[in-house]
Image: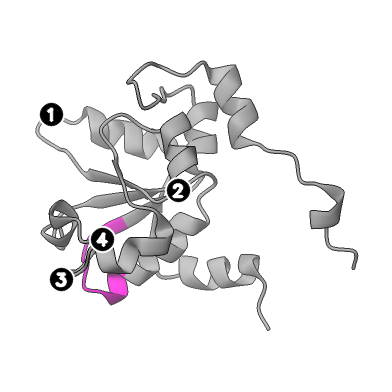
C-alpha cells in the first residue's frame, strides 16, 4: 500500500515542476502564454485563482481532455502540444494530473510545485470569480486550512 505522499513522489519523478518565480517569468514573457489549468474543486476555484486560468476539477480531468464527453473542454483537448501549467493548492494534485495528462498524450505539461500556496507566498496576485484581487492574508488562511485531530494519523 502506498500513501498519497508516496504516490505523488513516485509520479513527480516524471513530471516537470515549476516554482512560482518560474511561472511568473513565463507569464511575463512577451508572446508567451501557457495555458493555466486549475484542477481544484469548484469552491476552491471560485474563492481564488490565478487570473486567466481555466478550471477543470481533477475529478473530471480525463473526460475533459477528450472529445465525446459531457465534460469535454475543447480548448483543453486541442492543447495537447501547447504548454500547460497545472495548478492546485499545494502542488500534489497537480503532479498527479500532469502525470495523467502525459499518459493521455499531452507533450508539454508542468505542475506548479508549491501550488497556489507558494504563489501567494511569493506575493503574486489571486483573483476571485468577480475578478477582484483577493487579499494575501485572506488567501493565506484559505490555502492553509487546519488539519483536524481526527485527520491526523494515530500511528
Which numbered disc, 2 or 1, marks the residue that appears first in the sequence? Answer: 1
Seen at 26% across and 62% down, the residue is 64
Q: At numbered mark 2, what does the secondary structure look like: helix, strand or loop?
A: loop
Q: Nearer the viewer, residue 89 or 21?
A: 89
Q: Is residue 104 magenta?
A: yes
Mark 4 and mark 1 lie on one chain; the one further toward the N terminus is 1
**C-alpha distance separating marks 4 and 1:** 32 Å
Q: Are marks 4 and 1 in contact (CB under 8 Å)?
A: no
89 vs 141, left or right, is: left
Report the residue marked by disc 1. Answer: 30
Decide: marks 4, 3 in contact (CB < 8 A)? no
Q: List the residue tagged with mark 3.
A: 68
Query: How many neighbours does mark 4 have within 10 angstroms: few (below 14), some (14-19), or many (20 or more)?
Result: some
Query: Could you give the CA–CA distance between mark 3 and mark 2, rounded to whole angstroms?
Result: 23 Å
Residue in the foreground of this view, choosing between 48 and 20: 48
Mark identifier at residue 71 = 4
Q: CA distance from mark 2 to mark 4?
A: 15 Å
Mark drawn on residue 40: 2
Residue 4, by quadrant, is bottom right
- Residue at (40% x, 70% y) in the render: 14
Q: Relative to residue 88, is residue 6 depicted above or below?
A: below
Amino acid at each position: 500500500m502506498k500513501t498519497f505522499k508516496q504516490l505523488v513522489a513516485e509520479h513527480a519523478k516524471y513530471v516537470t515542476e515549476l516554482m512560482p518565480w518560474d511561472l511568473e517569468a513565463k507569464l511575463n514573457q512577451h508572446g508567451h502564454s501557457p495555458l493555466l489549468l486549475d484542477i481544484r474543486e469548484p469552491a476552491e476555484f471560485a474563492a481564488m485563482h490565478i487570473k486567466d486560468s481555466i478550471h477543470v476539477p481533477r475529478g473530471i480531468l480525463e473526460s475533459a481532455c477528450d472529445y465525446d464527453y459531457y465534460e469535454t473542454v475543447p480548448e483543453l483537448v486541442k492543447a495537447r502540444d501547447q504548454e500547460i501549467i497545472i495548478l492546485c493548492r499545494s502542488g500534489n494534485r497537480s503532479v498527479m494530473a500532469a502525470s495523467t495528462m502525459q499518459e493521455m498524450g499531452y507533450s508539454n505539461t508542468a505542475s506548479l510545485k508549491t501550488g497556489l500556496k507558494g504563489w501567494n507566498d511569493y506575493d503574486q496576485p489571486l483573483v476571485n470569480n468577480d475578478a477582484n484581487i483577493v487579499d494575501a492574508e485572506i488567501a493565506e488562511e484559505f490555502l492553509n486550512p487546519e488539519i483536524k485531530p481526527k485527520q491526523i494519523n494515530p500511528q
